[in-house]
Image: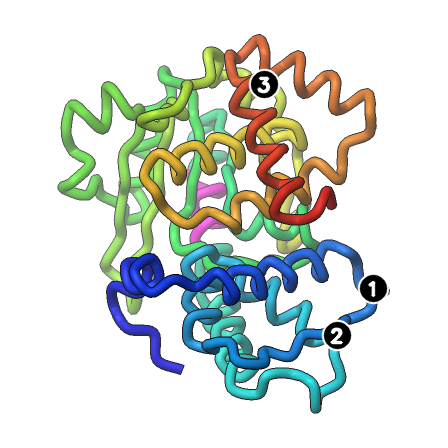
Amino acid sequence: MALPDGSYERLRAAGCADEVAYVQACLRLYFAGPHAGAGDISMRDLDGAKIADIARLNKVATFVLKALSRAPALERPPELFRWLDTYRRRTVSMNASCIMDSMAVHDVLRASEIDFVFLKGPFQQQLLYDDHFMKPSGDVDILVSPLGFFRARDALRKIGYEVSGKSNSVWWVRFLGEQHMTRDDGPRSSTVDLHYRLQQPGSPSPRDADGFLRRKRQVEIAGATVPFTSVADTLLLSCISVAKALFNREPCAGYVCDIGASAARLDEGDQQRLLDAATVQALDDTLLLRLRAADVLLGGA
């Protein structure tokens, strides 16, 4: 199923309310759990190319695939299902490469005794969905302290990474608090997004970014133990990502799914502690609005 360039603009111009509702129904089915009935998933007169575009742009194609997989084979939309399966295979390939890059980054930063934590990516997908390959992840995102930023950059240079031209500016380093580092010396390119702040234009910045380092947890990935954000911080970062996407008028259902999956792992006490922490970080409004978005999209899942 072809996906032409400019598909987002085409969707906005053409109107696709029914196709959006179909994708939403699939997301609600996925989050209802594996024992929920598939219901009516026939596409009737819907445009399969639009559904594919919506799922791809929002990074929820694998969610849709898993939802449709619960239906009997004869009831699945065949062309859409084939496209989704191909998308899934490409995601597996991309994320497998991202995991290998992440482990190389982990090893060099740990050898250099630099405090850091991984953000988002395949590690988060495994923790939220028990699957490293739910959404395509091409870059490795890491957070370090302001004092460790230049040391981390030097350490990454030891394994072939260099600052990309577009992020080698005062705006990126001083205001955004990050730089993109790329490595192009192998069969494929690799990118690390090195952060010491979590500022997103158009949305509040966490007052204490170092707190994400202090609260990190150790998780086992590919036989190794790696640092990752706490359950609460994972949810907060997803909320910030949605705020950034809305400010830029970008599709963001994949981030909203992460919010729903993160929130489902919190008990009542955890929820109150999260709200208290968000208030201290001046992110309470950001948190509450994005939790509401998850309720609307996923039906209170």
Q: Name the residue under label 3.
A: 214
Measured Cα–Cα span from mark 1 to mark 2: 9 Å
Amino acid at pointer 2 = Arg
Taking the image as shown, residue 134 lies to the left or right of residue 106, namely right
In the image, residue 229 lies in the stretch drawn in magenta = no
Which of marks 1 and 3 precedes in the sequence? 1
**How far from the left and from the top, in percent, is residue 96?**
50, 63
Q: Residue at x 51, y 60 (%)?
A: 20
Q: Mark 2 points at which residue?
A: 70
Amino acid at pointer 3 = Arg
Taking the image as shown, residue 27 lies to the left or right of residue 148, namely right
**Image depth: mark 2 or mark 3 in front:** 2
Q: Which mark is residue 261?
A: none
Measured Cα–Cα span from mark 3 to mark 1: 39 Å
Which of marks 3 and 2 precedes in the sequence? 2
| Range of magenta residues | 100-108
Label 3: state its secondary structure. Answer: helix
Q: Which quadrant is the C terminus positioned in?
A: top right
Q: Residue at x 35, y 62 (%)?
A: 11
Measured Cα–Cα span from mark 2 to mark 3: 41 Å
